[in-house]
């Protein structure tokens, strides 16, 4: 069993689908922190994606003693000096409203031509008490308005390089193939394949 240090059902669904299909095994069950009995909010007070991911993973491990992993994801916009970055989820405030976050981002980019951005995910895995880090990055740009209803977070305004659709217009299968989280999770999968026989 692996505990995913998240209380975000969208993330759990995405990662579970990727892991199940890639590992071709029923021996690995991924459960959420809530399923593992952690009711309180998982802390993420680091100032980098790496430190946040590790903080969350160690918090869950200390509470459950089980193999676990956590991720932290940030949207980095070049012209905003890498913002919102580690503060992506609470860019517009502690309410963590995706709509408010997108509104603030679009306002900050109003009239700006250079809209180059990237999503970056860092996964911290604690496996047999050892810590491992995996990173995934996808380059793209921020559109001037929302497109699509799938996905979550900044997906409606992020268009990955080489595609004409935003993440919110793509199927979950396609998004998982090319996304930052998909790429980081693939590195996690490659590691787990050697550990789970």
Image (cartoon, rainbow, N blue to C red):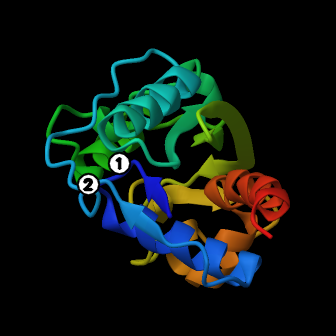
In the drawing, what numbered circle is on residue 42?
Answer: none
Residue 22 at x, y = what percent?
74, 77
Q: Nearer the viewer, residue 131 or 10?
A: 131
As helix, strand or loop, the secondary structure at mark 2 comes to helix
Can residue 141 be seen? yes
Answer yes or no: do the residues labelled 1 and 2 have beta carbons within 8 Å?
A: yes
Residue 119 at x, y = what percent?
62, 44
Residue 112 at x, y = what percent?
55, 34
In the drawing, what numbered circle is on residue 102?
Answer: 1
> Based on the displayed image, in which of its 4 quarters is residue 42 positioned?
top left
At x 70%, y 51%, the residue is 184
Can residue 84 be seen? no
Circle 1 packing at 10 Å, graded few (<14), some (14-19), many (20+), is many
As helix, strand or loop, the secondary structure at mark 1 comes to helix
At x 45%, y 77%, the residue is 148
Residue highlighted by disc 2: 99
Circle 2 packing at 10 Å, graded few (<14), some (14-19), many (20+), is some
């Amino acid at each position: 069993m692996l505990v995913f240090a998240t209380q975000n059902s969208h993330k759990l669904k995405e990662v579970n689908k990727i892991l199940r299909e890639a590992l071709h095994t029923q021996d690995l069950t991924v459960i959420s922190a809530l399923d593992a009995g952690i009711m309180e909010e998982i802390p993420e007070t680091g100032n980098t994606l790496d430190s946040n991911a590790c903080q969350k993973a160690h918090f869950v491990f200390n509470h459950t003693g089980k193999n676990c992993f956590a991720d932290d994801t940030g949207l980095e916009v070049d012209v905003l000096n890498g913002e919102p970055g580690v503060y992506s989820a609470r860019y517009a405030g502690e309410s963590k409203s995706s709509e408010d976050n997108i509104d603030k981002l679009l306002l900050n980019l109003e009239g700006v031509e250079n809209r180059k951005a990237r999503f970056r995910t860092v996964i911290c895995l604690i496996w047999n008490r050892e810590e491992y880090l995996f990173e995934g990055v996808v380059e793209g740009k921020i559109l001037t308005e929302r497109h699509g209803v799938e996905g979550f977070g900044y997906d409606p305004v992020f268009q990955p390089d080489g595609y004409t659709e935003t993440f919110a217009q793509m199927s979950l299968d396609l998004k998982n193939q090319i996304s930052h989280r998909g790429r980081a999770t693939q590195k996690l999968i490659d590691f787990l394949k050697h550990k789970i026989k």
